[in-house]
Image: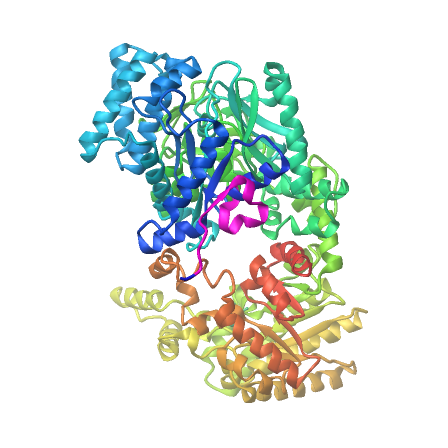
Amino acid sequence: RGVMVRYVYDFTQGGRDMAGLLGGKGANLAEMTRLGLPVPPGFVLTTEACRAFLTTGGEPAGLAREVSDHLAALETTAGRRLGQPDDPLLVSVRSGARFSMPGMMETILDIGLNDDSVLGLAKVSGSERFAWDSYRRLLQMFGSTVMGVDRALFEEESARLKDVRGVPDDVHLGAGDLARLVEIYKDLIHDETGDWFPQCPAEQLRRAVLAVFTSWNGDRARLYRRREHIPDGLGTAVTVQRMVFGNLGPDSGSGVAFTRDPATGRPGPYGDYLPEAQGEDVVAGVRNTVPLTELERLDPGSCARLREHLRTLERHFRDLCDIEFTIERGTLWILQTRIGKRTAEAAFAIAAQLADEGLITPEESLARVSGEELARLMFPRFDASMTGAALAHGVAASPGAAAGAAVFDSAEAVRRAAAGERVVLVRQETTPDDLPGMIAAQAVVTSRGGKTSHAAVVARGMGKVCVCGAEELSVDVRARRFTAPDGTVVGEGTALSVDGSAGAVYPGSVPLVDSAVMRFLETGDTDGEAAGVVEAVAGALARADTVRRLQVRANADTPQDAARARRFGAQGIGLCRTEHMFLGERRKLVEDMILARSDTERDRALAALLPLQRRDFTGILEAMDGLPVTIRLLDPPLHEFLPDRTDLAVRIAAAEAHGDLPDPHDAELLAAVDRMHEENPMLGLRGVRLGLLVPGLVAMQVRAIGEAVVERTRAGGTPRAEIMVPLVGDVRELRIVREEAERVLAEVSAAAGVPVTCPVGTMIELPRAALTAGRIAEEAEFFSFGTNDLTQTTWGFSRDDVEAEFFSAYLDRGVFPVSPFETLDLDGVGRLVRIAVAEGRATRPDLTIGVCGEHGGDPASVRFFHTAGLDYVSCSPFRVPVARLEAGRAAL
Ligand code: PEP
Ligand code: MG
């Protein structure tokens, strides 16, 4: 294109609003630089440069020039050149996408070291050991990341050298050993690639940058994006920043800090510090960190400044922030900041605190929590009386409770989970390579690392239970077992229970109890252990209820579910499926109805079903007294109520093999099953079609509803039943059923002398219904979108086979980022919804419109239904609080 594109920004030239271009990390570094915080200087290569590189496969024109200009500026400020032999400027090269993807892409440190500058670094730092150690780290990172040498080969070489020297650990290798290792690594790189490690600092920088760009499309990064629903097309920015060193002696170190506790939300700074270490060592959890109180003792000046900067950041960003910091010989540097990830508890607690402190408005406070987080808080915990003695304690890194079979590597976790087993992944520490196993597992346990280790950060992000740094466990990944301090050996496949809220690991499968939030939702009780969080949840829900326009109803078909839904705040029932009322011991009656040889026989069978249905409806209307209860007429194909064909055939064959005559009833059933067989029952004789074909079925169900209304009215209640017709595709189907329903209701009303009015409406769950909604609204007093069937029939995907193999291929290949059965497909199904809303209301302006497919409780879909102008969403009782919260957030 003709316009000059700019690919590089200095930290002094950007700000937080530029995250799309500079990535989250780059934008916030620029913001902190503006705020005057101590950030080592640097510059950012934009995501646009990355996209240009990834689409063309070549370095974008002009990029090299811009980089060298910015590097020159950096060198001027630093007063030394990149890799300058007597006093080298060194830089780090890090990825930084729009959305945080911790550990998923590459980082290369110490760029600028070579055979000459390592000597200069040794001299200016006063430590030969430090210089050689930095150089061998660069060779290792550059060799593997940029030049593609297997990481394990570097490890093997260093292990061999340690063997020769007879030392257990890297820290015991002296300057001479590390210098030797540098030679070994250089040869290794040459042997493996045929190329030497580049001695030219500018070339190191250029190749490191391109390697980070390339890592955007690495397997780990792609898997992470798929899971987090981050679009593949964004690309990553790259920050190039002057290195500062935390490993220059006892007055140096690195750490991670949060402005509040990210696990509980407790106010006040929270952090981990590792003296004499680089930042990577903290995140990797290689050694165990100390809390900030310890830093206070070691270096009170730096600690005070750190606290001050944390306050500045939280006030500025008006949210929980986390930072990475390094102290280089008593000087504090902030290397990055971002809005901190937090547990669901912490999200609610912090949102409430920040509003109380006046830092954010109550509306913002509502926007800061999500339905997904609320759902997480509703998870059960272990029954404390049943846990027994813990095998070990560690850091409570990600809350919740889960049990499963112990596994010791990612592949085994994936294998067992695919076979339907629940597993707990146990490792010494996790790396990004363990991601598939973490996704597959119910819980993660590590023996090393703090709340900011990889395992902890990733698990919290996923809402997965995690205990880390359980040091008492001696984990032997090779032997696939760990040993607890009491001598218990837990091998692969042994049941394990993990309490991520308490940081404890228990043997066996411990039973679960409801959460405090669940207890509050059920009883309104806000007292107890987790009172702070429960009150924050209560406050958020109350705010959501005052601002939301969408009503929330529940899908429920028993009085118990209806009552629970009501406690959870449901404003009625949006879908009462009547099919369950045809199961169990009533099956026989249904069989009689299906097998009836005459009208009289059928009427007799229907008459037997009538009182049972009436009793069901009465119970539900009582539980939901005063609120609307939408009862749907029978939907599934009738043969679903008959026995399995193979079972019948086997029974008959067995009888014959014994020389007996088969049971005539079995033979009759088999004939009926064969007669009613359909290749595509989901597209067959079901829904309104049954009502049109099976005489007396609609009348029986409507009579049961009408008589239940009479019974409830006589009992002094206010029953508000609504009759809903499923799978309508044409207005004439609805008209036929509606006329019959009104005739029956009039009869019931006249016979009882009690007025019975039940609105009659329809589900919109076929594309034809959506497209002819204007006509259908002539006969319908309300619409309810059946988005399960509407998705099935719009896409032509069978909703019963969504676990089909092509679905994961579709997710992998980016056809959709999430299953359309989970989150509504806005472009296709959503468009049909909008058409039906517009045309339905054009015919009947007061038409009530809701949704009762699974999407009614899906946070992203709730937002859409709000915008599309629906009156209510209806979802399973447990999702009612989630939908209330999301409907409130959608209205902000
Ligand atoms: C639907 O299709 O979305 C619906 C609610 O009905 P069912 O799931 O019972 O088919
Ligand atoms: Mg349906």
Quick check: can you spot residue 77?
A: yes
Q: In this picture, which residue range is highlighted in magenta? A: 3-25
Image quadrant holding the N terminus, namely bottom left
Please name the colour scheme applied to the rendered image. rainbow
Answer with the quarter of the image where residue 439 lies.
top left
Quick check: can you spot residue 557?
A: no
Judging depth in this view, the residue of 315 and 619 nearest the camera is 315
575 in relation to 297, above or below:
below
Percent across and percent down for residue 54 are 35, 52
Percent across and percent down for residue 590 are 50, 73
Count of all numbered marks drawn on residues in the image: 0
Is 892 part of what is drawn in magenta? no
Percent across and percent down for residue 869 are 65, 71
Horizontal side of 114 relative to 294 (left or right) equals left
Image quadrant holding the C terminus, namely bottom right
Judging depth in this view, the residue of 102 and 373 nearest the camera is 102
Judging depth in this view, the residue of 259 and 789 nearest the camera is 259
Is 11 part of what is drawn in magenta? yes
Q: Residue at x 34, y 13 (%)?
A: 175
Q: Work out which residue is located at the far right of the displayed protein and give it.
A: 716
722 in relation to 733, above or below:
above
Q: Residue at x 43, y 33 (%)?
A: 92
399 in relation to 2, above or below:
above
Q: Residue at x 58, y 30 (%)?
A: 38
Answer with the quarter of the image where residue 861 lies.
bottom right
Horizontal side of 578 relative to 353 (left or right) equals left
Percent across and percent down for residue 513 are 60, 40
Q: Residue at x 57, y 72 (%)?
A: 785
862 in relation to 114, above or below:
below
Judging depth in this view, the residue of 545 and 104 nearest the camera is 104
